[in-house]
Amino acid sequence: MRNNILSSVFIIMALLVSLPGTASAKQSSDQNAYYLYGDPRPGSKFKQKLFKNDVPFDTRYSEMSATLQARVKAPYGGLKDSEHPPFPSEGTQAIYYPLYKANRDLRDEGDVLAIAVIGTNGEVKQVSIYKAPTTSAATLINYIISNTKFDPASCDGSPCEMEYLFETKLETKPSIAR
């Protein structure tokens, strides 16, 4: 009887693995995702996922592989191979982590779309908020991006002024200790 139960379990597991849309399919579609983790939620040992992105949060543009650089360049249609957009000098964690920490108190949720003009010296010249869940969130995002140091865009090997696109979704997460 025990052998029958075990063989039934193996057959069911084999069927589940071969079905489309199971965990293995999700894993393959998520393999290009990177997460910014916080401390575990109260009562858990697992770190919580704060934000998801298609490039690593702690990597500078110059340290990225050609594939990752292409992901960063994708929204900037028309850039030549010799050109690249502006990028936070310390990676996108320089924006995402302060945003998470500050939003713990605001507890805003919703889509964010901001575009910043980055000068030839890497300083933010202007930030325009096109979408934010609240006025407080828009003010916060403007402040964080305005105070982030960027590596300037490059146009044919020379620093140039270019816009930086910032899109994310704010979600309320439990507080982390830092």
Image: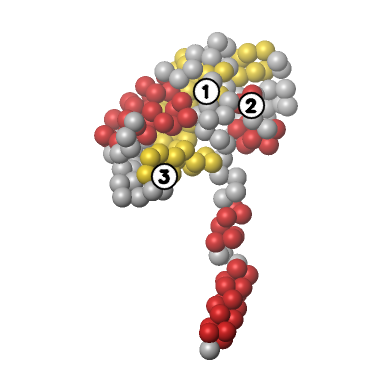
Which kind of residue does numbered mark 3 sit on?
A: Lys
**Which residue is at 58% across, 25% downward?**
60
Left or right of 66: which side holds 106?
A: left
Q: According to the image, label 3 marks what residue?
A: 47
Q: Is residue 41 above or below residue 63?
A: below
- Front residue of this view, candidates 5 and 58: 5
Whether residue 130 is visible here, answered yes or no, is no
- 3 and 2 marks in contact (CB < 8 Å): no
Left or right of 103: which side holds 97?
A: right
Tag 2, which secondary structure? Answer: helix
- 2 and 1 marks in contact (CB < 8 Å): no
Disc 3 from disc 2: Cα separation: 26 Å
Counting the numbered discs, the total is 3
**Mark 1 or mark 3, which is nearer the start of the sequence?**
3
Tag 1, which secondary structure? Answer: loop
Residue 144's image quarter?
top left
Tag 3, which secondary structure? Answer: strand
- Front residue of this view, candidates 114 and 102: 102
Q: According to the image, label 2 marks what residue?
A: 63
**Which residue is at 38% across, 31% downward?**
99
Which kind of residue does numbered mark 2 sit on?
A: Glu
Mark 3 vs mark 2: give the one in front. Answer: 3
Tell me residue 120's x, y (percent): 57, 12
Q: According to the image, label 1 marks what residue?
A: 90
Mark 3 vs mark 1: give the one in front. Answer: 3
Which kind of residue does numbered mark 1 sit on?
A: Glu
